[in-house]
Image (cartoon, coloured by chain):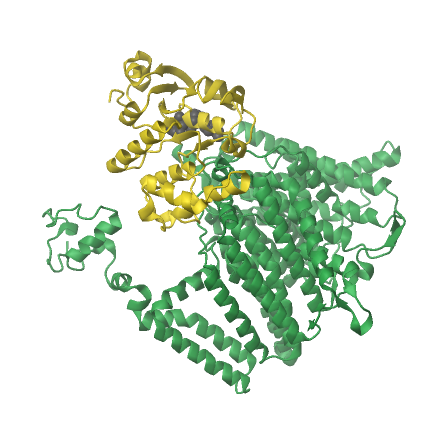
């Protein structure tokens, strides 16, 4: 009985901390419409700061608390709102999610930079573990009482805020109709900022409270994933209701402790199961949630993608393979393998192009599907032993097929609901996989079969061999990966140009209208998710083959999130965006960090500076990710646009190609190093559109636009330049007046706009 | 018997009754008007008929069958199509693809086998959109964009067509062409329900008009009866001119 009571109390305590975290999440989601994936990361940063102040610099506990919870928490929320969230109006849900994911990653990189992840940090309970009372034989520590009291106070406080105060009522209305609020004289921005400040304070508070409960070890990734516990709890209230969120949090906390208490401890899965509990509960809640109502009058989003024709995609695919081949001539074997690895990541990223770019749905754990395929291939697809070991084609096909089915099973519960739920489900699946499957390293017997899913924590996956095609040769592997990437990419473009692709676009742009035309949305989402999972699976198997051996660390949720973010940065609507994202996530980071580490080794005096620059580069990529809100269509979109403008400036293009050819020959003959080749190529690539605009403005911008660039702004037309017939036509066009609406001879009104034709410099 | 019918449909948002016990019918081969001041509940009624909104009570019948609990897509398969007051066009598709995709959806979700390209050309010809076929949707002015929505709905060869303020944002010439299109469609046997603030247009096209005010039907009848109804005049006083 005492055991039961003890664990009940522990469950209540854990639940109350979850409740604090979850209520912050619900608060910001409901007032800003942005689901904050970085909620746990905020908790993490705040907690690390608290640790630094109290344990690192020896400040008194109360002072650190005031600084962290009272100042840094609110300031962090207000800053996030002002700098980033405010700019996310009129962007697609995908963009909003990716921006908060970028913030999450940025905070993790930042913390790893400041607080080296391998140093151990311990946080003790408030008033120490020995401050406790005894009640009915149950020991309750002061820290635990604090957690319960704080949670209760927050519950009451939020209730009062929403029902009694004006600002609370306004808060509830903000997300529904900010324009109406503005009309009524409120300032929705200020309300949203307040809620971000509160949400982030609650996150920080939860982080500081939960760390000592879980043993006291401060660990960045684990705290960051507090967001999953929080959203699992919030699911009980459909991410809307705070009272139900509290109830959900308590259920979650209690179940977790009971699992620890009553599941057999010798069962290796118990610990993993406990950690995975929020994910399991999330899926259960997803299954029982009623279907979402389709929403009309969806926001007009700013994302735009140009769809290439199949023919031009095929041409570019050929060019791409040729370029990869030419580049491979410059490389040593080890670089070729690295390049191959990047290429396999790019294939995984293509799974995001079709799912997110075309269909508008999100998968936050693409690498986890790669892991599923890898496990299947490892168990069933390896033929031959020793040096002759290789993957068979059937093994790869089986792996891809199983991954597609697993993808369907994971997605199905979330498909009846809004896209956000699918994103949450995939993230939960990713963490679940890391906890349960990839940690299943020891043998055990189930239903008479002795096996382990991830034996010894490392899978040795040999490359594929089909007939004469043997990927054990690095160059062959690289070229095969490049050809596969090109084939899938062209296939996806063809898909987008087909009736199926148009239906995906329709569903993405307006689910309500697509449904009203008779589209079964669940079926369409289901199919495209399976397709996407299959592509991720194929990429995953190839990735494992290219690495030779993979461990659980290759498939972490952080790595998946990085891939998603970089692909969106590249341009989620474009296959070339996938190439960018895949190469950057797969090998870009490794190369950046590696390069700076090498520099640091070579020059110990400057060592720390170089290492810092390497870390800074990681944080910088996250900053770029946050910038997605400003440029939601991606970098590739801009680059394609600027090159599209060059198509009439043939001499510039030819000149550029010639310069690039010279660079290549210089690199091939060893006159310049590969790094210089890469840097100069990048410069050339970026400068060419600019050069084009400078050298041949008429061809690049079109005669009209060039003239306009030269001329005065519209407001000053007729003031700083003569009012001509041409100018009048331009004004008509800009103002949207039908041609000829204005009288041929402007009336003299004394207003500069109507100054008479040929009236030179009619300064008002 | 009307092809489409609502019986005692009531919709509530919190404590606010947006649609209050509404029973109306939409006949084949005619244009039925649905008018009322802003916020009267016209769009909400459309949403309920098409399945985007669950009613608190009441039933929706299509061809005598109860469809109140069917999903929107299933209603579309039974021959229901609509346009949206706040345009719901597919902004990443061209004008032609916006229309064509309706055919793609039909082919993929029902047993009907149509030649999508041919049908698209026919519908575009009929609605007079051929000249802007290859424009991006964002470059199309509102007036024409409304016609694109109508064309898209027509691609499904519907039996009932629900139009939510299709003429707003149109120029006079555009409205004229649109009126001709609508009466042509009705003559071919289509059941059309028209929500519109352009009262002269409603009075000219409709055989029956229902007037909603604060969610309830306050008058039903021929355009002439409606224009003379004292309730309608009272509801519209100070807002708009009833007599066309
Ligand atoms: N989703 C919603 N939640 C809460 N109230 C709503 C919702 N949709 C509509 N309403 C309310 O229901 C009432 C009817 O709105 P509706 O849009 O149906 O009117 P309408 O007749 O179409 O008006 P209009 O002529 O302006 O288009 C209004 O009071 C509106 O505020
Ligand atoms: Mg309306």
Residue B231 to residue A61: above or below = above
Which x, y percent locates residue A104?
60, 53
Image chain in green: A
Judge whether residue B228 can be spotted in this image: yes
Judge whether residue A588 can be spotted in this image: no
Q: Quadrant of residue A460?
A: bottom right
Which x, y percent locates residue A682?
48, 73
Which x, y percent locates residue A259?
82, 41
**In the image, is B12 to the left or to the right of A656?**
right
Residue A458 to residue A214: above or below = below
Which x, y percent locates residue A621?
55, 62
**In the image, is A265 to the left or to the right of A53?**
right
**In the image, is A133 to the left or to the right of A357?**
right
The foreground one among A23 and A584 is A584
Q: Residue at x 35, y 20 (%)?
A: B209
The foreground one among A249 and A493 is A493
On the rendered image, what quadrant is the C terminus of chain B found in?
top left
* Ligand 2 occupies quarter: top left
The foreground one among B14 and A362 is A362
**In the image, is A120 to the left or to the right of B104?**
right
Residue A576 to residue B240: above or below = below
On the rendered image, what quadrant is the N terminus of chain B found in?
top left
Image chain in yellow: B
Residue A403 to residue A249: above or below = below
Q: Residue at x 70, y 51 (%)?
A: A431
Tell me how many marks there are.
0
């Amino acid at each position: 009985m005492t055991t039961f009571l003890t664990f009940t109390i522990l469950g209540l305590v854990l639940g109350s901390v979850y409740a604090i975290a979850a209520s912050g999440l619900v608060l910001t989601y409901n007032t800003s419409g942005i689901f904050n994936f970085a909620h746990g990361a905020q908790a993490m940063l705040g907690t690390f700061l608290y640790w630094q102040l109290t344990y690192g610099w020896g400040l008194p506990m109360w002072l650190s608390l005031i600084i962290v919870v009272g100042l840094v928490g609110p300031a962090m929320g207000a800053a996030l709102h002002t700098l980033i969230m405010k700019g996310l109006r009129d962007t697609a849900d995908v963009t909003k999610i990716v921006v908060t994911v970028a913030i999450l990653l940025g905070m993790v990189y930042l913390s790893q930079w400041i607080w080296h992840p391998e140093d151990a940090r311990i946080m003790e309970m408030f008033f120490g573990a020995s401050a406790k009372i005894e009640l009915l034989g149950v020991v309750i520590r002061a820290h635990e009482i604090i957690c319960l009291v704080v949670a209760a106070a927050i519950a009451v406080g939020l209730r009062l805020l929403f029902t009694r105060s004006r600002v609370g009522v306004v808060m509830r209305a903000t997300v529904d109709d900010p324009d109406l609020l503005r009309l009524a004289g409120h300032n929705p921005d200020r309300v949203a900022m307040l809620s971000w400040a509160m949400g982030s304070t609650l996150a920080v508070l939860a982080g500081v409270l939960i760390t000592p409960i879980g043993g006291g070890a401060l660990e960045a990734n684990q705290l960051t994933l507090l967001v999953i516990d929080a959203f699992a709890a919030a699911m009980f209230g459909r991410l809307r209701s705070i009272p139900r969120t509290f109830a959900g949090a308590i259920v979650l906390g209690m179940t977790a402790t009971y699992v620890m208490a009553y599941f057999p401890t010798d069962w290796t899965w118990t610990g993993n199961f406990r950690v995975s509990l929020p994910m399991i509960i999330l899926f259960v809640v997803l299954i029982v949630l009623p279907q979402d109502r389709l929403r009309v009058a969806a926001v007009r989003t700013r994302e735009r993608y140009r769809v290439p024709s199949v023919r031009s995609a095929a041409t570019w695919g050929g060019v791409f393979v040729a370029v990869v081949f030419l580049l491979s001539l410059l490389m040593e074997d080890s670089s070729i393998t690295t390049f191959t690895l990047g290429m396999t990541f790019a294939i995984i990223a293509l799974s995001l192009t079709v799912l997110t770019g075309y269909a508008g749905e999100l998968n936050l754990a693409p690498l986890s599907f790669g892991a599923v395929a890898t496990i299947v291939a490892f168990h069933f697809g390896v033929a031959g032993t020793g040096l002759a070991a290789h993957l068979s084609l059937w093994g790869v096909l089986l792996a891809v097929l199983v991954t597609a089915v697993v993808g369907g099973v994971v997605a199905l519960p979330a498909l009846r609901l809004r896209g956000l739920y699918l994103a949450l489900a995939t993230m939960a699946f990713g963490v679940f996989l890391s906890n349960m499957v990839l940690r299943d390293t020891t043998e055990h017997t189930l239903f008479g079969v002795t096996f382990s899913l991830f034996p010894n924590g490392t899978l040795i996956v040999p490359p594929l061999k089909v007939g004469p095609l043997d990927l054990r040769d690095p160059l062959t592997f690289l070229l095969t990966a490049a050809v596969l990437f090109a084939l899938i990419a062209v296939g996806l473009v063809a898909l987008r140009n087909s009736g199926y692709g148009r239906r995906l676009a329709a569903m993405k742009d307006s689910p309500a209208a697509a449904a009203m035309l008779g589209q079964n949305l669940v079926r369409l989402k289901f199919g495209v998710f399976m397709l996407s999972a299959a592509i991720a699976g194929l990429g995953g198997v190839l990735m494992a083959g290219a690495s030779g051996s993979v461990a659980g660390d290759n498939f972490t949720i952080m790595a998946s999130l990085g891939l998603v973010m970089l692909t969106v940065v590249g341009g989620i609507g474009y296959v070339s965006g996938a190439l960018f994202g895949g190469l950057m996530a797969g090998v870009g980071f490794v190369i950046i960090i590696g390069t700076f580490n090498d520099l640091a080794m070579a020059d110990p005096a400057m060592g720390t500076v170089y290492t810092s620059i390497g870390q800074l580069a990681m944080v910088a990529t996250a900053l770029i990710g946050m910038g997605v809100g400003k440029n939601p269509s991606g970098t590739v979109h801009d680059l394609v646009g600027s090159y599209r403008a060059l198509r009439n400036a043939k001499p510039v293009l030819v000149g550029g190609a010639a310069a690039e050819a010279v660079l290549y020959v210089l690199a091939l003959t060893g006159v310049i190093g590969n790094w210089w080749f890469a840097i100069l190529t990048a410069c050339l690539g970026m400068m060419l559109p600019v050069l084009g605009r400078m050298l041949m403005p008429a061809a690049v911008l079109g005669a009209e636009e060039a003239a306009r660039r030269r001329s005065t702004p519209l407001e000053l037309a007729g003031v700083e330049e003569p009012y001509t017939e041409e100018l009048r036509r331009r004004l008509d066009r800009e103002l949207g007046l039908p041609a000829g609406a204005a009288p041929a001879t402007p009336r003299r009104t004394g207003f500069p706009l109507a100054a008479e034709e040929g009236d030179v410099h009619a300064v008002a | 018997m009307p092809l489409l019918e609502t019986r005692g449909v009531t919709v509530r948002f919190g404590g606010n009754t947006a649609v209050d016990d509404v029973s109306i019918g939409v006949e084949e081969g005619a244009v039925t008007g649905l008018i009322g001041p802003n916020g009267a509940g016209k769009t909400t009624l459309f949403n309920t008929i098409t399945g985007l909104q669950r009613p608190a009570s009441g039933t929706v019948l299509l061809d005598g069958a109860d469809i109140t609990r069917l999903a929107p897509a299933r209603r579309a398969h039974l021959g229901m199509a609509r346009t949206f007051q706040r345009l719901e066009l597919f902004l990443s598709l061209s004008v032609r693809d916006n229309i064509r995709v309706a055919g793609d959806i039909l082919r993929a979700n029902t047993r009907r086998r149509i030649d999508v390209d041919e049908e698209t050309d026919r519908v575009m010809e009929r609605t007079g959109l051929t000249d802007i076929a290859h424009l991006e949707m964002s470059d199309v002015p509102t007036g024409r964009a409304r016609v694109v929505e109508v064309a898209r709905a027509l691609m499904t060869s519907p039996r009932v067509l629900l139009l939510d303020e299709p003429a707003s944002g149109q120029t006079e010439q555009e409205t004229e062409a649109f009126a001709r299109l609508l009466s042509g469609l009705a003559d071919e046997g289509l059941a059309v329900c028209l929500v519109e603030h352009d009262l002269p247009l409603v009075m000219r096209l409709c055989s029956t008009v229902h007037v909603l005010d604060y969610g309830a039907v306050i008058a039903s009848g021929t355009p002439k009866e409606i224009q003379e109804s004292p309730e309608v005049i009272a509801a519209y006083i100070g807002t708009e001119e009833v007599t066309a």
